[in-house]
């Protein structure tokens, strides 16, 4: 409830309106004071392993004594929190018969149980069941689809970038003809010359040798795999999105490149996602867009 920002000691306090709007004013004041203690410890660079350690409790008891408040270490907004947990999943394995949760996972956000949860490995060993979503807020799927369409329309997607880069919308067939081919069309037949000065005028003029201009050497991507350069999509001057294969797995990456010896070489700054992580990122686009709109 009190995100701390910046390395220079700055911070901001943001309180949850849905949790506090139905509570009495004293709860709002005490919650704000609670978060202000956290902010004070952050600004004064007082670091403790426990967020509610001795320093926090010292300020808490001091304020309670002077102002007559009842600041506590933990909140008691359990009913409000449960009210906003509208995304429900239930396991189809054995743990649906075990206490205390009976296979239920309820969350305020649409974040399905996965290996990112600290208890996931133990669940896979003891139960191994699959979590199936059984409830979500009314109209959530339509809202999410609308947000996805809006974000795709605003920023475009990877498929449209690929089509635009390789001009896949307009298929143009290119015919390569041999210079000695007799089927090439001629605009004028050399034998139809109007000159009557002799047969030597009817001979075709000598061919001029074409001087081929060497194309300018542009930096190319240095890669260990074949065809990786075709799977690079420029995001900025030296930043590219790439689709490549690594140890038999397809990876989607965003990386900074640098030029050396006329070639583009991948730098250290970047990130690579496997297909599962890429799918999660795409599914999270609406929530990311919604978060961006808050700034």
Image (cartoon, rainbow, N blue to C red):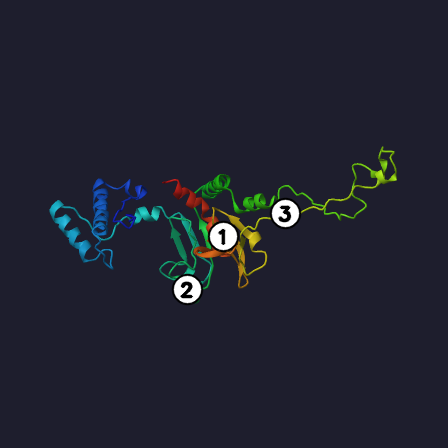
Tag 2 residue:
121
Choose mark 1 or mark 2, whichever is in front: 1
Image location of residue 29, percent across then percent down: 21, 43
Apparent side of residue 240 relative to residue 100 in the rendered image (left or right): right
Image location of residue 184, percent across then percent down: 78, 43
Tag 3 residue:
213
**Which quarter of the rendering shows the C terminus?**
top left
Kindly give the residue lying farthest to the left in the view shown.
66
Q: Secondary structure at mark 1?
A: helix
Q: Dot 2: few (<14), some (14–19), or many (≥20) neighbours within 10 Å?
A: some
Q: Nearer the viewer, residue 12 or 226?
A: 226
Question: N-terminal of the two: label 1 or label 2?
Answer: 2
Task: Check contact, mark 1 vs mark 2: CB within 8 A.
Answer: no
**Position of 100 relative to 237 (above/below):** below
Choose mark 3 or mark 1, whichever is in front: 3
Tag 1 residue:
279
**Position of 205 relative to 118 (above/below):** above
């Amino acid at each position: 409830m009190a995100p701390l920002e910046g390395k220079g000691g700055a911070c901001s306090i943001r309180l949850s309106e849905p949790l506090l709007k139905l509570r009495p004013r004293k709860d709002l004041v005490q919650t704000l004071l609670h978060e202000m203690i956290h902010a004070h410890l952050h600004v004064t660079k007082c670091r403790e392993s426990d967020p509610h350690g001795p320093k926090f409790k010292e300020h808490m008891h001091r304020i309670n004594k002077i102002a007559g408040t009842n600041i506590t270490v933990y909140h008691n907004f359990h009913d409000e929190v449960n009210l906003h947990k509208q995304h429900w999943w239930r396991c189809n394995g054995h743990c649906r018969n075990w206490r205390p949760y009976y296979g239920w996972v309820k969350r305020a956000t649409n974040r399905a149980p996965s290996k990112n949860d600290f208890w996931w490995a133990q669940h896979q060993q003891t139960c191994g069941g699959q979590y199936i979503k059984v409830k979500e807020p009314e109209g959530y799927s339509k809202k999410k689809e609308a947000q996805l369409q809006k974000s795709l329309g605003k920023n475009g997607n990877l498929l449209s970038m690929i089509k635009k880069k390789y001009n896949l919308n307009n298929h143009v067939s290119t015919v390569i003809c041999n210079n000695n081919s007799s089927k090439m069309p001629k605009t004028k037949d050399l034998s139809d010359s109007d000159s009557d000065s002799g047969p030597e005028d009817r001979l075709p003029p000598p061919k001029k040798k074409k001087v081929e201009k060497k194309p300018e050497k542009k930096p190319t991507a240095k890669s260990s795999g074949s065809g990786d350069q075709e799977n690079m999509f420029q995001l900025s001057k030296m930043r590219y999105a790439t689709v490549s294969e690594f140890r038999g797995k397809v990876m989607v990456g965003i990386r900074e490149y640098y030029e050396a010896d006329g070639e583009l070489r991948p730098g250290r700054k970047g990130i690579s996602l496997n297909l599962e992580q890429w799918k999660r990122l795409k599914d999270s686009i609406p929530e990311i867009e919604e978060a961006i709109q808050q700034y």
